[in-house]
Amino acid sequence: MFHTGQIIQLPSLAGVSYTDIFAALIIMVVGLFIASFTRRFITRLTREVLPVSTRIFVERLAYYTVLVIAGMAALSRLQVDFSGAIIAGGIFGIVVGFASQSVVANLLSGIFLHIDKTIQIGDTLEVIGTEIMGVVTDMTIFSTKIRSFDGTQVRIPNEKVFTSSIRRFTAHSARRVQMQVGIAYGSDITKAISAIREALAAQPLILADPAPAVFVDRFDESSIVLNVFAWAPVGEFFAVRQLIPTVIKEALDANGIQIPFPQRVVHIVGQSTEKEKQ
Amino acid sequence: MLVLKFGQWDYSSQPVLQLQEYRLEIKKADSRFRYSRIRQGQVIETVFTTPKEPSLGLYPTKPLGLLETVNCILLRLREEVLIPPDGGVELELTCPFDLAVIITEGEHHWVVDRFPVTPVKYSLYGPPERGVVGRYHVSTRWETVDEETRRELALTTIYASNRYQSWVRLRQIAIPTEQIDFFYDENQAYTGVVKVEIKSKALASVLATNQPPRSNLRRSPVLSPAQNKMAFDMEWGY
């Protein structure tokens, strides 16, 4: 059985001189000064190197570490015995450690995310295997906040972000838009392909290089399916994605190429055709 | 044909300008000005208030087109150029520009409007994971361009030199937009001189200088001065 009262010696001011009290005050003031100086120094040192959220975390960590050290130094000047507190703190630390594994994991993951620069504020991303998709709006030491496309906010613990596969949509300068279109079996494939290519080439936001690609993908029941690939500047992806179907439809209409409805030829068993009757 | 005089816009005597399919208008009521750009029924308006008569001008500027940030102007040469080892060539080529309507007060400039005067196209220079998006233009030799087209394009003077020990073929030039300066005379736009140095089989460096290509040219207002005049390395083919 552990009795806190038997081990921790409560601080006593007995025997403490005015000089000690004055010295403790001086230590605290100096400690405060050093903590502020350290914080400013870290700000200056990391302003252009670290992301804001990481910088704030490091600043706070340094500031409070210096303050705690100064506080302990001041208290020991006042003859406060920390041995009991350290033992109790150790046991308390073990209990808290077990209870806060996930908190620590999130904290460490948050630090690693900042160091690794896996994701950054402003990125559009998808956490693969979940339904989470949106824009990163904030990254704190414990969690990452994402504004999903429907305007809601999703908070993900950093550990989950760090251990998940992430698809970043805005990592590169350009993105490929792709879609499929079916044309009627009676259509001139070459004419359809060149009509779509020309229409895409006339669009300013579709990149000239890599050039748009249009090719036959497969032969479906009712149509010949064409694949259409076009590249757009990453920030214009959705504008181009919205534009392409209209451009393709107009190009095919202008060239008399039909996008067919699903068709099915039905043969009725036992019913002779006109040809057989003749 | 682009009938346009660069420089000061005397809006009190000529409040309406017709530039190809664009119509620019200034309407004044007391100290309130309403600027409009009208194209195919689409109107873009800016209202500004100033106690004194503003100095308004039309200037050629960086060809960003429809995007706010474009890293480079990618000139794809219609006629490729062969350069011998330790040789050099001077080229006069076409280059797109945007037209900017700018208020000037002393050393300060405010952009009222900016728009492209020729069809816009973009291209990726380099691979998607590392490349940059640039304003794309198929560039022809200036001497082959007719008078009408010259009004719509800027003349860019390129000094290309080959420091590599073999013949090289120059197909394209990526000029960093941050660094390029524009100049004008009454009705013709120019870029500053561009220096291309071919260093190896895979690398050329491009420096957009701030030197005018001819004398007696005026410089367009510099809206966002480049921090450093550094050469742009073309590492994905030239």
Image: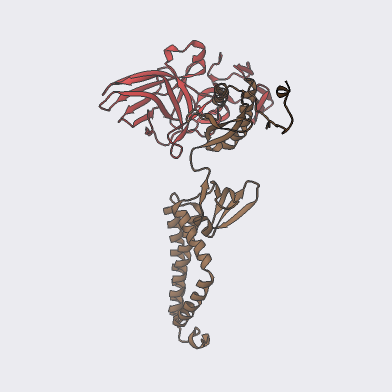
Chain colours: A brown, B red
User: Is B136 positioned to the left or the right of A240 in the image?
Assistant: left
Nearest the viewer among B93 and A234 is A234
Q: Quadrant of the C terminus of chain A?
A: top right
Q: Position of residue A178 (x, y in %)?
A: 56, 35
- Give the residue drawn at x 43%, y 74%: A73
Q: Position of residue B205 (x, y in %)?
A: 35, 31
Nearest the viewer among A199 and A60 is A199
Where is B192 relative to A236, above or below?
Answer: above
User: Is A149 positioned to the left or the right of B196 in the image?
Assistant: right
Whether residue B37 is visible: no
Count how many numbered circles sit on residues in the image. Answer: 0
Q: Position of residue B139 (x, y in %)?
A: 44, 20
Where is B238 relative to A28, above or below?
Answer: above
User: Is A9 positioned to the left or the right of A203 in the image?
Assistant: left
The image quarter in which residue A238 lies: top right
User: Is B147 positioned to the left or the right of B27 in the image?
Assistant: left
Q: Position of residue A225 (x, y in %)?
A: 58, 31
Residue extending farthest top: B147
Nearest the viewer among A123 and A195 is A195
Whether residue B160 is visible: yes
- Give the residue drawn at x 53%, y 65%: A103
